Image (spheres, helix red, strand yellow):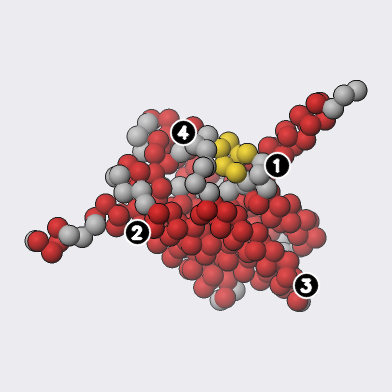
Amino acid sequence: MNRLSHIPWRNLLPNSVTLLAMLAGFVSIVYTMNARYVPAAWWIFFAGTLDMFDGGVARRLGSDSVLGKQLDSLSDLVSCAVAPAVLVYATFFRPWGIWGALLSFCWLAFAASRLARFMGNTQERADHFQGFPSPVAASFPASCVIFAEARWGAYPYPELVATLLLVFCYLMVSTIPYPKSFYLVSERILTTWQGWGALFLILIGTLFPTRIGLMALIYGLAPPINALRKLVKSRPA
């Protein structure tokens, strides 16, 4: 019993959730390597869902730590950067050869850069993200794969996907503020009825993954469009 009392249980639970998200990203990569692209996309969604909880669980237990924050970023590197990059190359960009590989690497490079900035950012505001959060962004290429497979049984329009992918890459490393939904902050999901309702809608939404991708597209483009609109209005006539 004395040995068990020295185990940091408070740290184990949130870090275990983080590692599960990393495992989901790794499983996605394994599925992609075996040409099972739709399950690979689903595992990216699963990783993003787990990512919503680890930080909130840590703060609720009073076990928020530098180690947990760094582990979370490393988990996101696997599940939100490497896994989507490998998946989108295998489905949409493989026919482009080395250029397709470099284009897929752009996602990995920009997502990794955003995560590195997050790890070094000690003044993050509680009401918004700085730049497009990578777990939300990763749902877009995953939903593209599921939609294309269900609609055509193939992966057409790589030019359109490439264009949107590069736009998302820029938004991830931008300084554009992205609002955090009040009831989707992880601490509130399990402690308020509104949070439970939001979680229920997310789980229902997973039955329609293309809609999640559409919501990610709207969430990603709305803030820069709004900022551009304000800039135009502020210019003297």
- Could you tell me which secondary element the residue under label 1 belongs to? helix
Specify the label residue 8 is tagged with: none
User: Circle 1 is placed at which residue position?
Assistant: 221
> What is the quadrant of the C terminus in the image?
top right
Amino acid identity at mark 1: Leu
Q: How far across and down, in percent of the image, does residue 227 sit?
A: 73, 34
Amino acid identity at mark 3: Trp
User: Circle 3 is placed at which residue position?
Assistant: 99
First in sequence, mark 2 or 3: give its number. Answer: 2
User: Which residue shows up at 85% across the image and 27% down it?
Assistant: 235
User: Which residue shows up at 75% across the image and 76% down it?
Assistant: 98
Q: Is residue 145 above or below residue 187?
A: below
User: Which residue shows up at 51% across the image and 54% down it?
Assistant: 119
Amino acid identity at mark 4: Tyr
> What is the quadrant of the N terminus in the image?
bottom left
First in sequence, mark 4 or 3: give its number. Answer: 3
User: Circle 2 is placed at which residue position?
Assistant: 16
On the image, which quarter does residue 110 sit in? bottom right
**Furthest residue to the top?**
237
Specify the label residue 183 is tagged with: 4
First in sequence, mark 4 or 1: give its number. Answer: 4
CA separation in Å, label 1 and label 3:
26 Å
- Could you tell me which secondary element the residue under label 4 belongs to? helix
Pointers 2 and 3 in contact (C-beta within 8 Å): no
Q: From the viewer's perspective, is 197 left or right of 145?
A: left
Circle 2 residues within 10 Å: few <14, some 14–19, many ≥20: few
